[in-house]
Image (cartoon, grey):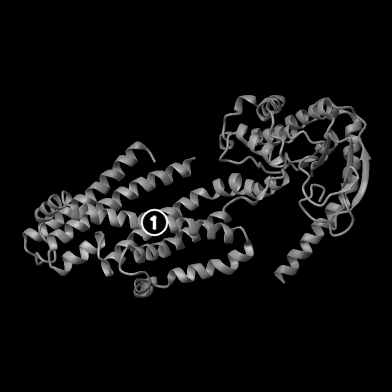
């Protein structure tokens, strides 16, 4: 893509954001929607400014960040390990890849009440829930990634006397990395959304809990302020992870 | 089978008296038809990793540079494979095979993907290397001219199932110059090879035709 194309695509992205906020302002000023459902943008901005300086804000952000970090670390460790274990064998891939895809298609949220019964309403139930959801895209992408490694490289490495560990370190891992990174990125956002969803459904702390609480109290401006925080964090994380994935693919 | 990558269903392959039951990286190096340079490493790192695989990484840099120099590619040591042409990559694969310092080099149609001019130049390079290193090279080719130009001994194979049909010696010292290809002796051996292979080529074509007709029936 040329520099001109890149500038044009960023301009279109900014335009979409501007149209979104302009529509928000226009709808609220025209009183087209009840302010309880969609508060005025300045009111949300004021709530946001007030919120950022409070300990409630930092506590909630801290809980969600830690919960997501631990859940993601677990899903990465298990997802990559399972992906490598299965993906290296054609028989295991044929047997287990459809099973993992099938389980991923099941709405795992149905089991969330059971997870809460077992692990309680604190962060551990959200860690388990997020880790389970994050596991699937990471494992599936790792399995798919291994099939993209050219068998000729594996044959060549074997002919040179490479051990299993050397084949993993020098052939499988770098060869599969671009596709694995895509899985890591998708897995992160699914994990993050699951943690937030879990906090919204049943929790005593975290950003999701604050959104649900403000909703129940019908404090729509603070509720939207929390949502804007989540959206901002998501956009920022997407940019960071996208840039990292781009660098890996170019390497 | 010679390289230990496939198991023999019948008979044995022996190297220095021992049966081959798997890859022998200390005794045999490979040059495949397609480049096996790992695209995520530079050329020099490809040599390092290959020598680590083989378990002979001591002095890898000097040995790698010497091998690259022997095929005139030392200035590309820091390049990635994607920055090189097919011919350059195959030249480097050849250098890596030499760098392994094995007695035997297995070359499976290494020049098949190259254009005619590059094949000729690499063939000359290989002949020089043969003269310099005295390695045993098992070279698989479908090119009659390449076989006559490079080989000391040509083993002609039959169509499937592949069996040895004839063994011809080419008594011409290495390094061989391109002028060798203009000699009556070269033409005589090449024509002899073609005579030996003509029936095999016909039976292969017939077998392919029968298989196609059976599939479409």
- The residue lying toward the viewer, choosing from B52 and A153, is B52
Residue B153 image offset from top left, x and y in percent: 90, 38
List the residue tagged with mark 1.
A70
Q: Residue at x 65, y 33 (%)?
A: B88
Q: Quadrant of the C terminus of chain B?
A: bottom right
Tell me which residue sits at (35%, 72%) in the image: A112
Label 1 SS: helix
- Residue B99 percent location from the top left of the image: 73, 32
Q: Residues within 10 Å of mark 1 (few under 14, many from 20)?
A: some
Residue at image coords 31%, 54%: A65
Q: Which chain's residue wears label 1?
A: A
Residue A90 appears in the rendering: yes
Determine if residue B176 is in view: no
Q: Is residue B147 above or below residue A73?
A: above
Q: Give the mark count.
A: 1
Residue A99 located left or right of residue A123: right
Q: Is residue A45 left or right of residue B200?
A: left
Residue A224, quarter of the rendered image:
bottom left
Q: In front: B14, or B142? A: B14
Q: Residue furthest left?
A: A30
Name the residue rendered at 32%, 38% in the picture: A4
Whole-percent x, y for residue A195 in the image: 33, 62
Location of residue B202 with respect to B75 vertically, above or below: below
Name the image quarter holding residue B131: top right
Left or right of A224: which side holds B39? right
Q: Position of residue A128 (x, y in %)?
A: 39, 65
């Amino acid at each position: 893509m040329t520099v001109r194309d890149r500038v044009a695509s960023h301009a279109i992205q900014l335009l979409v954001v501007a149209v979104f906020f302009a529509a928000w302002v226009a709808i609220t000023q025209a009183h087209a929607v009840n302010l309880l459902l969609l508060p005025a943008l300045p009111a949300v901005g004021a709530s946001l400014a007030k919120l950022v300086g409070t300990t409630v804000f930092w506590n909630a952000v801290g809980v969600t960040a830690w919960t997501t970090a631990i859940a993601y670390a677990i899903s990465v460790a298990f997802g990559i390990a399972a992906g490598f274990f299965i993906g290296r064998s054609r028989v295991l891939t044929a047997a287990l890849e459809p099973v993992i895809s099938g389980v991923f298609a099941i709405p795992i949220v149905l089991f969330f009440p059971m997870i809460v019964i077992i692990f309680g309403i604190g962060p551990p139930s959200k860690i388990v829930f997020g880790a389970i959801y994050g596991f699937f895209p990471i494992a599936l992408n790792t399995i798919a990634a291994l099939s993209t490694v050219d068998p000729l490289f594996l044959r060549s490495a074997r002919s040179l006397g490479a051990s299993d560990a050397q084949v993993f370190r020098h052939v499988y891992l770098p060869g599969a990395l671009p596709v694995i990174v895509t899985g890591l990125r998708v897995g992160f956002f699914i994990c993050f959304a699951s943690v937030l969803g879990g906090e919204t459904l049943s929790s005593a702390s975290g950003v999701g809990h604050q959104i649900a609480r403000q909703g129940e109290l019908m404090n729509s401006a603070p509720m939207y302020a929390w949502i804007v925080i989540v959206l901002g964090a998501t956009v920022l994380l997407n940019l960071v992870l996208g840039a990292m994935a781009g660098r890996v693919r170019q390497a | 089978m010679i390289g230990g990558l496939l198991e023999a269903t019948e008979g044995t392959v022996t190297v220095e008296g021992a049966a081959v039951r798997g890859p022998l990286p200390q005794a045999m190096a490979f040059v495949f038809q397609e480049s096996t340079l790992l695209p995520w490493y530079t050329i020099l790192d490809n040599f390092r990793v290959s020598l680590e695989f083989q378990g002979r990484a001591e002095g890898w840099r000097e040995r790698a540079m010497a091998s690259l120099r022997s095929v005139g590619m030392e200035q590309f040591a820091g390049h990635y494979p994607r920055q090189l042409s097919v011919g350059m990559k195959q030249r480097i694969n050849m250098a890596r095979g030499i760098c392994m310092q094995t007695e035997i080099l297995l070359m499976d149609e290494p020049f098949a993907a190259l254009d005619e001019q590059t094949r000729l130049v690499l063939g000359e390079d290989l002949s020089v290397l043969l003269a310099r290193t005295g390695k045993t090279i098992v070279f698989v080719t479908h090119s009659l001219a390449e076989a006559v130009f490079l080989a000391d001994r040509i083993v002609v194979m039959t169509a499937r199932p592949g069996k040895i049909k004839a063994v011809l010696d080419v008594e011409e010292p290495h390094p061989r110059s391109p002028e060798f290809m203009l000699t009556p002796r070269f033409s005589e051996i090449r024509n002899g090879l073609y005579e030996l292979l003509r029936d095999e080529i016909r039976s292969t074509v017939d077998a392919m035709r029968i298989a196609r007709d059976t599939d479409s029936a």
